[in-house]
Amino acid sequence: MPRYRRCRQPNCHAMVQFPNHYCPKHFEHEAEYLANRQRWARKHSEQYQHKEKQYNHHYNTVTRNRNDNRSEQYRFYRSKQWVDLRQSVLNHDHYLCQYCKAIGKLTSNSKTVDHIIPIAFDHKLMASSSNLATICNKCHRLKTKWEQGYYGTGQGMEMKNVPEISEISKIVLLMHQK
């Protein structure tokens, strides 16, 4: 069933079938109206893109690269070495979350690869496949929160002097403690 709306001409009550905006009597205004809409949309999308570009520039140059360690981590995650390492871990773990598996639950189709011991805490383990495991989104959120409390990673980056825990089953138990 076709959709209708009122003619955009003031005081004209004629009905117009979509996608038109003006009735046949006032159709000469249609082209001008569409041109104004396109001009408005272009102007506002440029403003939005400019703000987004400014935010991304600040994030990439200041926040993400706030120190040499963070800058090196960012470069590592964009390297071919990481892409190959990540894929080999996903294949090895068969896309199963290793943290769920530790508690007897199978969560398939996990596509995130996580450092068991955070590289912010021990930088030497950045490219070590023995320090990597496939993790689902839910476990990743829980583990990140746990790491911030246990290791002191995150925004403040005040590292604590604590022993490293590399066994996933122990981490899972600590993650689920309140």
Image (tube, rainbow, N blue to C red):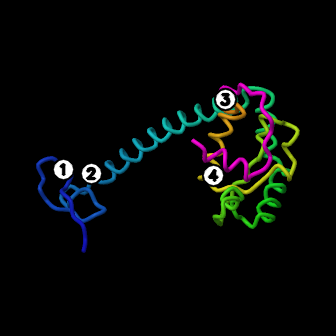
Callout 4: SS? helix
| Residue 44 drawn at (x, y percent) | 44, 39
Q: Which range of residues does the magenta coloring cover?
A: 156-178
Q: Report the residue at 70% width, 59% height from top.
A: 102
The image quarter in which residue 121 lies: top right
**Among numbered discs 3 and 1, the one appearing first in the sequence:** 1
- Tell me if residue 169 is in the magenta stretch: yes
Q: Which residue is mark 2?
A: 29
User: Which quadrant does the C terminus fall into?
Assistant: top right
Q: Which mark is residue 1?
A: none
Name the foreground residue: 15 vs 126: 126
**Among numbered discs 3 and 4, the one appearing first in the sequence:** 3
**Among numbered discs 4 and 1, the one appearing first in the sequence:** 1
**Amino acid under label 3?**
Thr
Q: Which residue is mark 3?
A: 63
Callout 1: SS? loop
Q: Which mark is residue 139?
A: 4
CB atoms of marks 2 and 1 within 8 Å = yes
- Tell me if residue 54 is in the magenta stretch: no
Q: Which mark is residue 9?
A: 1
Q: CA distance from mark 4 to mark 1?
A: 58 Å
**Amino acid under label 1?**
Gln
The secondary structure making up most of the magenta span is: loop
CB atoms of marks 3 and 2 within 8 Å = no
